Amino acid sequence: MVAAFQPPGTPGGPRAALPAPREMLVDPRFIRLADHFFGMFTQPSRGGGALAVYLDGKPVVDIWAGWAAKDRRWNGANVALTFSTGKGVASTVVHRLAERGLIDYEAPVAAYWPEFAAHGKGDITVRDVLSHRAGLHRVRGLVPGREGILDYDAVVRALADSPPDPRRIRTSGYHAITFGWLVAEIVQRVTGDSFTEVLRREIAVPLGTDEFWFRVPESERRRIAKIFPHLSPPGIRWNTASSVLSWVRPSRGLAEAGMPESFDELVRDPRVHDAVMPGWNGVFSARALARMYGAMANGGQIDDLRFLQPETIAEISKTQPAAGLDYVLGLPLRFTLGYHRPVLMSKVQPRKAFGHYGIGGSGAYADPQLGMSVAFVTNRLGNAATALGDARLARLAAMAQTTVRKLKPTATPAEL
């Protein structure tokens, strides 16, 4: 069924939270995209998910399908653990604060967080952190024990007391998990408030959407879709695989940055939702993500809300300089200021778009040149070959891009 919904609230002021809709929304121009999405979740083994699209500041797609658990269908209220998708949300908090002069991208992190200057890190800037050039990618062994990363204060102290990787001077090194703590602590030091409170104040309340969580309220946890399968490769224990990879030179950086002890078990531990780990434990709805990125795709405006200034969006969407391959992933990644360029299953890749994908398949982004945002969340991690990821979002995004380019023929491939 198709339903139109508009956010409540007074102009420019706080908005009441949007209720989870019971009816789906599909603009007729996006029927082909919706048909493809529904075909992705035809049986419980494929799990479920939700897809949302904004165009020119208005919702045009808000749909869901499949199973939130083996015995429970996905509905309009479900949310999902989206892994690195949350990096984009955390970065957006920084940009809201920077716009008001509370954070300077060029300022040393130590100006806000004095302990950070230890071991020669006094010249590392906020821009370096947002572009994965702080040299603090290592999470493996950062704090002791499999549950050590649940202790925010211990992790933050360990990061402040860590020496930076010297390769940061030359190029980026993807901070797969540590990114979130670095951003969160900068925010906390600047504002004097907890990161979750600032997130609520800067993102959830203005957008009128509660579903931006790193620490999930107890009353909302029933809405979280159950993720599957296990992250470990078939027949290989996570800790064994991460230990082996940490000794192999080409994969050492990946093991250091993204494979802490017993992480495959930790992602299913309910205590994850008590912790603040913005690098990976964000729980969102596709609807909420699409609305946030929809504002940024629409020149910073959503309904009567000025979410960000156009000048800010232009700055944060610039590709950050890096020479050579990312030293963690071994790939020529193109980071913007807290985001990366989205990858589409298309010959035409958007050159000005920015957002963040997560392992397993979820992700969201804004394309300011098309005025479009796309967000996809799922509980089915990857495909039969690997749980780390697949091409579902890349295909959905390509279809959405094709549709909008037909609607806006002046947006030529050269302009994209």
Image (tube, helix red, strand yellow):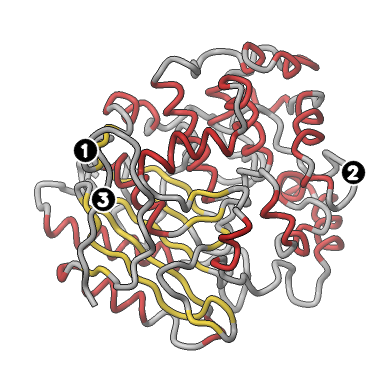
Label pair 1/2, CB-CB below 8 angstroms: no
Left or right: where 233 falls relative to 88: right
The one of 334 and 19 positioned closer to us in this rendering: 19
Q: Residue at coordinates 85% horizontally, 57% vertically from top-left?
A: 244
Label 3 or label 1, whichever comes before in sequence order: 1
Q: Is residue 410 above or below residue 232?
A: above
Quadrant position of residue 122 = top right
Q: Which amino acid does label 3 sit on?
A: Met
Q: Disc 1 marks which residue? A: 304
Percent position of residue 54, x then y: 27, 54
| Mark closer to the chain start, 1 or 2 | 2
Q: Does dot 2 land on a helix, a strand or a loop?
A: loop
Could you say where residue 164 lies in the image, as x and y percent from the top left?
74, 25
Relative to 186, is 402 above or below? below
Give the number of the mark in front: 1 or 2. Answer: 1
- Which residue is depicted at the point 61% across and 26% down? 188
Q: Residue drawn 79% across and 16% down?
A: 118
Q: Which mark is residue 144?
A: 2
**Location of residue 204 with respect to 169 vertically, above or below:** below
- Determine crowd level at label 3: few under 14, some 14-19, many 20+ residues with C-alpha closer than 10 A: many
Which amino acid, by three-letter code, is at mark 2?
Answer: Pro
- Element at label 1: loop
Give the CA separation, mark 1 to mark 2: 48 Å
Above or below for 320 versus 36? above
**Which residue is under mark 3?**
372
The percent coordinates of residue 353 (x first, y second) are 34, 43
Which quadrant, please, contains the C terminus? Answer: top left
Q: Distance between the residues labelled 3 and 1?
A: 18 Å
Q: Is residue 355 left or right of residue 167?
A: left
